[in-house]
Image (cartoon, grey):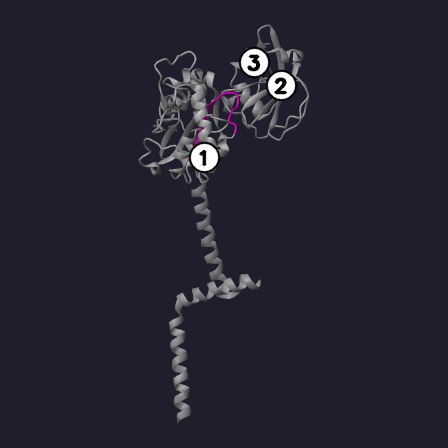
Amino acid sequence: MKKILSLMLVLTILSSLTACAGSGGQAETSSRAAETAAESGTELSGAAAESSEETSEAAAQSETEASETASADPALSGNILVAYFSWADNAILDENVDAMSSPSVLSPGNVEQLAGWVQEETGGDLFSIRVTDPYPSDWDACLDRANEERGNGVRPELVENVSDLGQYDTVFLGYPNWWYGVPMALLTFLEQNDFSGKQVYLFCSHGTGGLANSVELITEAAPDAVISDSIFDCYEEDAPSSEEAVKAWVAGLGIAGAGSAASEQPAPQAEAAAADRVAVRCGEIEVIYELNDSPAAAALAAQLPLTLEVEDYSTNEKIFYPPQELDTSGTPAAEGGAGTLAYYAPWGDVVMFYGDYNANSSLYELGEAVSGAGQISQMSGSIEVAPLEE
């Protein structure tokens, strides 16, 4: 009798366990089986395999959708902020400031003008980064203080901050090149705000140093921002005449403000192909270059004609700065000799070699001189770069 009762009890317990399993238990079993199979390298079969495949497909689909969402260009939606640091907004003006010798300290300053044109094209909100302790209006004294701040890693206190950076998906950030980098107040601004996932476009006014280390410093201060490779930079003396170049740059990004002239017209750089030949003229000197068919050469040709200042660099080259950065994708490295026309990407300058040079991974070839190469070293001051008229 005891044996019969024991047998009935066992059957009751087994029946109860089977009823409790249900679909949830099967899913959990399949999931654990899938994990075990993945670890052991064995294959699943039957219902467990089918359930595991459905779960994997759903997870893959979800992951794909998330990836597509994350990769969407944030610049295509949401508000736009145009933030900038300008010496003119951060200086104590001396009564004896000379507008001719210190034009960039008088409002509107170089970067302030660039920011204004960006704002006109994007319709974004304009924000001036200002320090509580302004800089001297004497340039040498300003540089001395800027150098001291840089050496000590100072983060100057700001007058105010953006009230809600979270409302912006896209940020245009403007600054001057100070001591081959950025004003330390710009780092204050970057470190006091969360730029995670925001699309950031840079524009810069500089002297002979070009962008120098500024992009690296900004990237370190805002490591989670998405900083675009398309950067606008110009020589400080050319800033007041750069309105068209700035607006063309913004239009080329595809995010120009509604109703702007630039948004209704394709960017010159996007459509233009490289001219076969360009002439660089300096007084009576004329050097003719035959451009290659690279994207960088096409980008340069799209900006012509240009009137710029030519500068000496080292003992074998003359350089000038086009208003817009050149697209170096698919552009060959410069490996020629005297007469090579090249582009040095880190500084954004076009190089006219009149002597031999060492190859550099950041130096790209645009073309070769076909006449006048022997006169390159004699160029000085203002030059005109234009397509060669047949």
> Compared with residue 55, is residue 378 higher up or lower down, i.e. above or below?
above
Distance (Cα) linking label 2 and label 1: 35 Å
The disc placed on residue 107 is none
- Residue, disc 3: 387
Magenta stretch: give its range: 199-212
The mark closer to the camera, 1 or 3, is 1
> Which SS class for mark 1?
loop
Q: For this view, does 176 lie left or right of residue 81? A: right
Q: Which residue is at the front of the view, 355 or 180?
A: 180
Identify the residue position indicated by label 1 in the image: 153
Circle 2 SS class: strand
- Circle on res. 317: 2
Q: Is residue 118 visible?
A: yes
Q: Is residue 32 left or right of residue 123?
A: right
Judged left or right of residue 278, residue 66 is: left
Sequence order check, earlier mark of 2 and 3: 2
Identified by mark 2, the residue type is Glu
Amino acid of disc 3: Pro
Q: Secondary structure at mark 3?
A: strand
State the residue in front, 196 or 214: 214
**What residue lies at 62% left-to-right and 10% top-to-bottom?**
378
**Residue situated furthest top in the rendering:** 284
x%, y% of residue 319?
58, 18
Residue 195: image location, x then y, percent: 40, 38
Q: Please state the horizontal and vertical placement of residue 5, each as a whole percent of the image.
A: 38, 89
- Marks 2/3 in contact by CB < 8 Å: the verdict is no
Q: Nearer the viewer, mark 2 or mark 3?
A: 2
